[in-house]
């Protein structure tokens, strides 16, 4: 494992912990898209089904279990425990416009036409766009809490570091996965405008505001 993948994993973990702590400490999920969190839970569920069929390493297994557990814990907090604080009126992105095309694409473009491989491919494609409901929600409300922007920053950083990881592996290991790379590029591009606002506003102590 190279340093870029490790720091990418840690950035991903940091994003998840930041979000969970934000919800738990504030006893509120205001400003958080439940739809994005459901999509992420679906991503981890379909990607890590290999937990039932293979063992790679203790680190690999532990991280997979943490991702799945935290994803469903977040969904539970939003839709059950703190349901009264969930802003469903602004979380209106039509997720079927993401899930259906992604599902179709995973059947057409994959490494191997087998159930586990198709589901893995589906998870890669879906993860690249799963943040769209959250970004759409921020655009509708016109602003985001600072802690929410920290969550988004670390989530985007994880994806950017994984892109560097793929480049590293290509040059030093001869490993190349076009599906993962293209999906990673798409996901990173979605974060570009947010990264700019994060650096120019949030890091300077200003609240992130967007035109509604």
Image (spheres, rainbow, N blue to C red):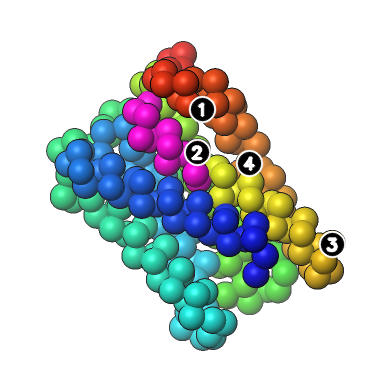
Circle nearer the N terminus (4, 3): 3
- The quarter of the picture where residue 7 lies is bottom right
On the image, numbered disc 2 is attached to which residue? 153
Q: Label 1 neighbourhood size at 10 Å, few (<14), some (14-19), many (20+)?
A: many
**Mark 2 to mark 4 CA distance (whole Å):** 11 Å
Residues at marks 1 and 3 touching, judged by CB atoms closer than 8 Å: no
Residue linked to disc 1: 198
- Check disc 4 and report the residue beneath it: 188
Q: CA distance from mark 4 to mark 3?
A: 21 Å
Circles 2, 1 touching at the beta carbon (< 8 Å): yes
Q: Which residue is mark 3?
A: 171
User: The magenta stretch spans which residues?
Assistant: 144-155
- Please determine whether, in this image, residue 67 is positioned above or below residue 22: below
Local SS, label 3 = helix
Q: Residues within 10 Å of mark 3 (few under 14, many from 20)?
A: few
Q: How many marks?
A: 4
Q: Nearer the viewer, mark 1 or mark 4?
A: 1
Residue 151 painted magenta: yes
Left or right, 72 with reference to 123: left
SS assignment for the magenta stretch, majority: helix
Mark closer to the chain start, 1 or 4: 4
Reply yes or no: does residue 184 show up in magenta.
no
Image height check: is 169 above or below 32?
A: below
Secondary structure beneath label 4? helix
- Please name the residue shown 62% across and 72% down the image: 117
Secondary structure of the residue carrying numbered label 1: helix
Find out whether the residues at labels 2 and 3 contact each other: C-beta distance under 8 Å. Answer: no
Which circle, 4 or 3, is nearer the viewer? 3
Q: Mark 1 and mark 4: span between their CA atoms? A: 14 Å
How far is disc 2 from disc 1 in space, using C-alphas? 7 Å
Q: Position of residue 21 (x, y in %)?
A: 28, 47
Q: Is residue 10 visible?
A: yes
């Amino acid at each position: 494992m190279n340093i870029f993948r490790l720091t990418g994993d840690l950035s991903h973990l940091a994003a998840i912990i930041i979000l969970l702590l934000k919800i738990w400490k504030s006893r509120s999920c205001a400003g958080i898209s439940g739809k994005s969190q459901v999509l992420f839970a679906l991503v981890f569920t379909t990607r890590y089904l290999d937990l039932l069929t293979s063992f790679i390493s203790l680190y690999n297994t532990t991280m997979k279990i943490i991702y799945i557990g935290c994803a469903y814990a977040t969904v539970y907090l939003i839709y059950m425990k703190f349901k009264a604080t969930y802003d469903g009126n602004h979380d209106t992105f039509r997720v079927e416009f993401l899930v259906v095309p992604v599902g179709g694409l995973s059947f057409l473009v994959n490494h191997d036409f087998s159930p586990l491989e198709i589901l893995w491919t589906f998870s890669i494609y879906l993860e690249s766009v799963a943040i769209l409901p959250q970004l759409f929600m921020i655009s509708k409300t016109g602003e985001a809490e600072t802690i929410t922007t920290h969550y988004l920053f670390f989530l985007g950083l994880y994806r950017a570091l994984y892109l560097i990881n793929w480049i590293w592996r290509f040059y030093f290991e001869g490993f190349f996965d076009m599906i993962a790379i293209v999906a990673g590029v798409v996901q990173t591009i979605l974060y570009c405008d947010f990264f700019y606002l994060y650096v120019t506003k949030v890091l300077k102590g200003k609240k992130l505001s967007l035109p509604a």
